[in-house]
Amino acid sequence: MTLPPDPKSISTVNYLNEEKTVASWFFTHDHKRIALLYLASITFFFLLGGVAAMLMRIELIHPRGELFTSTTYNKLFTLHGVIMVWFFLIPSIPNVLGNFLIPMMIGARDMAFPRLNLISWYVFMLGGLFAVFAILVGGVDTGWTFYTPYSSTYSNSWVIAMAVGIFINGFSSIFTGLNFIVTVHKLRAPGMTWFRLPLFVWTLYSTSLIFVLATPVLAITLTLVALERGFGIGIFDPRIGGDPLLFQHLFWFYSHPAVYIMVLPAMGVISELIAAFARNRVFGYNFVVYASLGIAFLGFLVWGHHMFVSGQSVYAGMIFSLLSFFVAIPSAIKVFNWTATLYKGSITFDTPLLYALGFIALFTIGGMTGLMLASLAVDVHVTATYFVVAHFHYIMVGGAVMAYLGGIHYWFPKITGRMYPETLARWAAIILFIGFNLTFFPMFILGYMGMPRRYHVYPEEFQMLNFISTIGTPVLGIGYLLPLIYLGWASFFGRLAGPNPWNATGLEWQTPSPPPKENFAEIPVVTTEPYAYHLLPEAAGIHQETHDR
Amino acid sequence: MTFPLLPYEDSSYAARVDGIFVSLLVLCTVITLGVFAVIIAFCIRYRRGSPADRSHRPSESTQIAVEFAWIILPLLIFIGLFIWAGNVYFEMFSPPADGVAIYVIGKQWMWKIEHATGQREINQLHIPIDRNIVLTMTSQDVIHDFDVPAFRIKHDVLPGRYNTMWFKATKTGTYHLFCGQYCGDFHSLMVGDVIAMSPTDYAAWLQGHGEGTSDTLAADGSRAFHALGCSGCHEGSQVVHAPSLNGLYDEPVPLQSGQVVRADDTFLRDMILQPAKNVPAGYQPIMPSYQGLVTEEQIVSLIAYIKSQKSAASADNPTHP
Ligand SMILES: [Cu+2]
Ligand SMILES: [Cu+2]
């Protein structure tokens, strides 16, 4: 089944060189090219959000906030949050790796709705245009959470423009979700039964359910904010008869599941990476599948844990706390199963695995601190402090972004047909890990000591820890810039990879790299479980050196 | 229980929160390090080319048993944690009846504090130690949050309603008061101090800030009650059939709708701003709304006045229902 490495594969016709005009990119229906359009766009947004974060960290070296005015600082953290959540994290793995890989992994030639796929990118860009417009004309100062009545009545910034941007962005998510769901249902290759699907496909399937079910609520919520802001219709502001807590219920009903939109695909990537580099079947495959679906379902029932001190009823708080403990179980199952997958494997420490191990470490810390936040009395003390900031960055940056980069490295040879420089890449992964912890670990301590988030000016006793955190930022920045540079270089000058440099299972590796436009010359027929590493020749003791280092 | 990295703990509640936190910290650290240790051990033992034995991988039934073990064990631990932390939370939201009642009004970007005895402060809250303090809080504009990390307490302060929070300081000192909910431009300057004092110092402070004069919150309220025309209807009017407010505070009020509500701060506030919301049984809904005509401070003083009529009423009529 495995093709031999073919050094000439790059020169044959593939999805990258088949057509060369600019129009052939902007009007492409090929899921692989659309994935690259997304890749370029979200990289831009990541840099934008990253610069804002960098400026904030520089400002926070000084407790009196000398560099910017409070208004500018507030706009910076809003920009950072909005851009990173909606224009980077949510589309990252689904729209880049998911787009590229779902059809390839299930043995299809494209998505179920190729044109909708392209439209979804245009819609995304239109939303981005509104967001960038809102930033350029003056910015928004509500925080990414848009709490009312501040956002709907009091803020003097470009709230509606930004809300429109996010509203439009939501449709891109919905289109993507629909496309994924239908593709997985309808286009699986012969023999690709549900329980032979790679775990990455399962997590994206679960994510798509959330896309489709939760995103409309966000659209409704933002519309209501705009109605109150634009026309004075009393929905959230009590002065005109509204209820400010209603907003929080609606917002978190979307935004908690959105956390899983960011994390589930990351978990899927990690399952692929661990299996490939431990050369082992994923331990408890079925449990991991049900854990993904369980997370998607339970994720809808815990929104109130963001509101333990908001004035919602004490009994509601109790129930949301209990359910939040429950939603931690499926995540724990996954961590245990990844660990067990290493057992009796044959592990190589290539860059993707380093990212995967980094993910597990940071995600576990993020998850454990999540348990602390689910514990009601503790949450009262640390909610809305830097403890929460640290917690969700461990999940969403330590977790989701690590997995995204791990995935990018792992599938880079498939996407470009070339290898990245392994040694440099390993160093970058290690630098990233160190920089991340340096930047975000001090925030846990700051938070428990009581430093509130979104504080431009803060008491002097918090300066030391803020300073350490800021020191971590350039290290983290280098950790991100290095891959950007060497991956860019390797796309053109890297060593040819051949179809399956990792000698991995999975249909995506059974076609040339880069793949031809139609992915497979012939639609493959699937006869085995997804991670059949024990059936590969090497399992019988023949160690195949598939790539040198 | 103290821990070098914990902030100073200075309320009855703080030690209990820290107790939970430290236990969680120990538990989570043990589990996390345990997982890391296993991962590292596997990575070393099963690195490619190592001589480790890879035969006899766990059978299907072992796998399932292991899966159930690591589902059920955490579940039991989680339920225990939930009950422990939930219990303390529950207590935080059950204010004692004997507390010192203090009103807090948040606005962009300051805290206004009103003591029942008439003292008013801005961005400062003076309290006696070892007494239960009950805060009744509202906001004039956006959502704020009354956050005193040293006491491990925090609660949002919403416009349009009262939220209560209580605590008991155990050590004298000056502690940070933060606004914990983002509220606009000068959110990070909406800070102040909570000054916890010994009972004698506190008594002296009260004295030095106008105790003993007739300027209590209730006295203010009494003036507003007349100035706003409430007394015209509510104090023995021949023309209008309106209920007497003497002894009303905290009593059950049967409503036209058949419901019975307690005449607490929120009820009184709603009565003044949205009288149509709760119409007492046996009366015509003719009371006008004072929305836009009274400030939050006036509402607070009116409530204090109605409250004071409670003690007056029970003094002359101890059998009042
Ligand atoms: Cu949540
Ligand atoms: Cu505030």
Image (cartoon, rainbow, N blue to C red):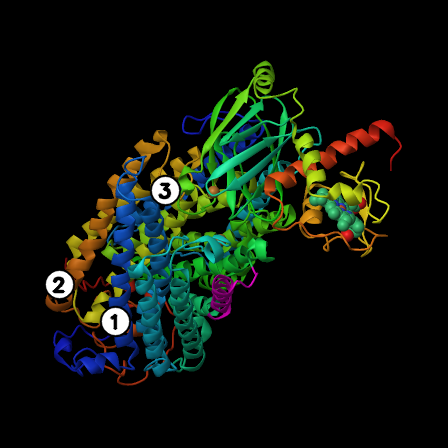
Q: Do the residues indicated by labels 2 and 3 lie within the same chain of the protein?
A: no
Residue where numbered disc 1 is placed: A36
- Position of residue A443 relative to residue A545, above or below, is above
Q: Is residue A286 magenta?
A: no
Q: Whole-Å distance between the Cαs marked 3 and 1?
A: 38 Å
Ligand 1 within 8 A of label 2's CB?
no
Chain letter of mark 3 equals B
Task: Give the residue type at disc 1.
Answer: Leu
Q: Residue at x 34, y 82 (%)?
A: A114
The local crowd at label 3, few if under 14, some if 14 to 19, many if 20 or more residues have their Cα within 10 Å, is few
- Tell me, yes or no, if residue A420 can be seen here: no
Label 2 sits on a secondary structure element that is: helix
Between residues B200 and A498, which one lies in front from this camera angle? B200
- Of badges 2 and 3, nearer the viewer stands 2
In the rendered image, which quarter contains the C terminus of chain B? top right
Which image quadrant for residue B11? top right
Residue where numbered disc 2 is placed: A489
- Residue B28 image position (x, y, % from top left): 46, 40
The answer to whether residue A546 is left or right of residue A190 is: left
Chain letter of mark 1 equals A
- Position of residue B57 relative to residue A418, above or below, is above
Contact check, label 3 and label 1, Cβ < 8 Å: no
What is the magenta range? A212-235
Residue where numbered disc 3 is placed: B37
Between residues B50 and B261, which one lies in front from this camera angle? B261
